[in-house]
Image (spheres, rainbow, N blue to C red):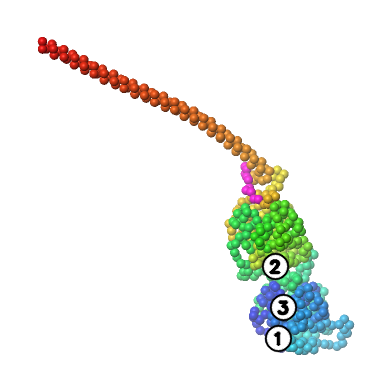
Amino acid sequence: MKPTRASPIRSDVKASTGIKGLDEMTGGGLPRSRTTVLIGGPGSGKTILALQFLVHGARACGEPGIFVAFEETAVRIVANADSFGWDLPALQRKKLYFLEAQPGPDLVQSGTFDLSGMLAALAAQAKEMGAKRIVFDALDVVLALLPDSVSRQRELYRLHEWLLDQGLTGLITGKAGAGSDCNEKQAFGFMQFMVDCSIILNHSVVIGVSQRNIRVQKYRGSSFDENESPFLIGAAGLEVAVARTLGESHANVTNERVSSGVKRLDTMLGGGYYRGASVLITGFPGTAKTTLSGAFAEEACRRGERTMFVSFDSDGTEVVRNLASVGIKLDRYVKNGTLRMVSARTITGSAETYLVRIKTTAQEHRARCLVIDPVSTISKSGNELTAHSVAERLIDWSKAAGTTLVCTSLLDEMASQDEGGSPLQISTLADTWIHLNYLVQAGERNRGISIIKSRGTAHSNQVRELILSNNGVELADIYTAGGEVLMGTMRWEKESAERVEAEVTEVAAKLKGVMLDAQEAELEVRLKSLQTELIAKQVEKALLARTTESRERELSHGKTRLAELRGADAAVRVRK
């Protein structure tokens, strides 16, 4: 056996696959000038991944490629890939070469054979076109023609050595599954030890829902994401779902606020939702979750922001009609193209299917605001295990795109009000959580609204009554009487009784005021009369005092005069 020519793989010498998510898992792509084996069951996407790897290399990296087909003809492969928009015929002229190496159906094997002749022809073709990448698709078809495991391992080793000698970035695909031949499993098991990178594709059905997953089993000389990640075959090929890695930040944080569409709710939130935030509205059926999300959509359209409303429960036209009954007019924005209504009732498949289609449609519409009603739908029909991961990536994507996301989540009427226990568990991820509930009293059902959390902002901790009318959504303070919360008719009756009581009290107070005014006037008259009588007495007293004083002066004067007269008589008597 020849000594290995492998050397540590650096991140700057990796061959990008062009597959969103897979490059993130591998830290940049497949090992350049090395060999990667891709193993998966039927329908797992092996051929698509391999072909997408070549197309990206030819288009974006300037690396021509060769596709060796052991199972399907080149015509069929090109026709099957036409739906992805890769335009393979244009690439076939200079940058992409197809070699048909599939055994014929009437092949009669005589003696032994090896791959050396085919590899020699491939070496000449690679040199002629300057190929840097090569794919051997369904190599197991040829290996099955070899008589024993020793022969199969010999040819695998020959192929691996040839790839290293040519300096080509090789990708070998093979089948694996319950129906695979035991010899094939042993051969590819041997090759997984030999190559530098091994990738496993899995396609299964969970409760009737198709689920595809990818896992990097090994990657020599490089760190990689070891966990299994779901992927989807979409309109442009494979897309691997990879959650945001620790330490990475894709969101542009802003203090800008956007209105919820309900003024008093904006006040409760300290000014509205943050731009680019994720908002969750939970509640039982009929608690006005769609109405609140519709009010947000209308306000966003009123600001001129392109908005998308995804409805899982009803057709878009029904949503527009129903919201018009509470004063939310969306039809004009649908007509002018600002609002796009998407009915997701026709979407079938895994939670990944929901996520990819929502993201693709939102990007096509260039939506700044997105409503999903209800997002809890993605946790149903076999998606319970993957729903939380999908919700996490939905929120990460909306934050990275700066899209304000409003989701509603339907609670089971028979379940508790703790939404956090649902399989989706989006309440732990949302920035703002608004909860709607019922209060049943005296045969009447009324709605209440409260803010459970709102990260990064002061918010009201009080419950408000939510009232729907022809004029829209209104929030009223919760009314309490005797320690009991009253809403609806009971509140109206209690408030009416209090108004009557207040009016009676006001009339009684006015009557009492009039009586007091009369008494005051009477007292003022009496006071004036007494004051007049007092003045008269004072005048009379003064007059009496002057009269007495005058009499006393006259009497004193008379006595003096009398004394004088008497004194004169005495003097006459003395002279005599």
270 relative to 469 in the view: left or right? left
**Please, which residue is most extreme toward the left here?**
576
Which percent across, then down, holds residue 457? 59, 58
Which residue position holds label 2?
A: 363
Which label lies toward us, 3 or 1? 3
Q: Is residue 443 above or below residue 337?
A: above
Decide: few, some or many residues near mark 2? Use Cα within 10 Å; few <14, some 14-19, many ≥20. few
Mark 2 lies on a secondary structure that is helix
Which residue position holds label 1?
A: 167
Lower position in the chain sequence, tag 2 or tag 1: 1
Q: CA distance from mark 2 to mark 1?
A: 39 Å
Q: Going 74% across and 56% down the picture, which residue do you hit? A: 319
Range of magenta residues: 474-483
Which percent across, then down, holds residue 285? 73, 53
Lower position in the chain sequence, tag 3 or tag 1: 3
Q: Is residue 150 above or below residue 276?
A: below
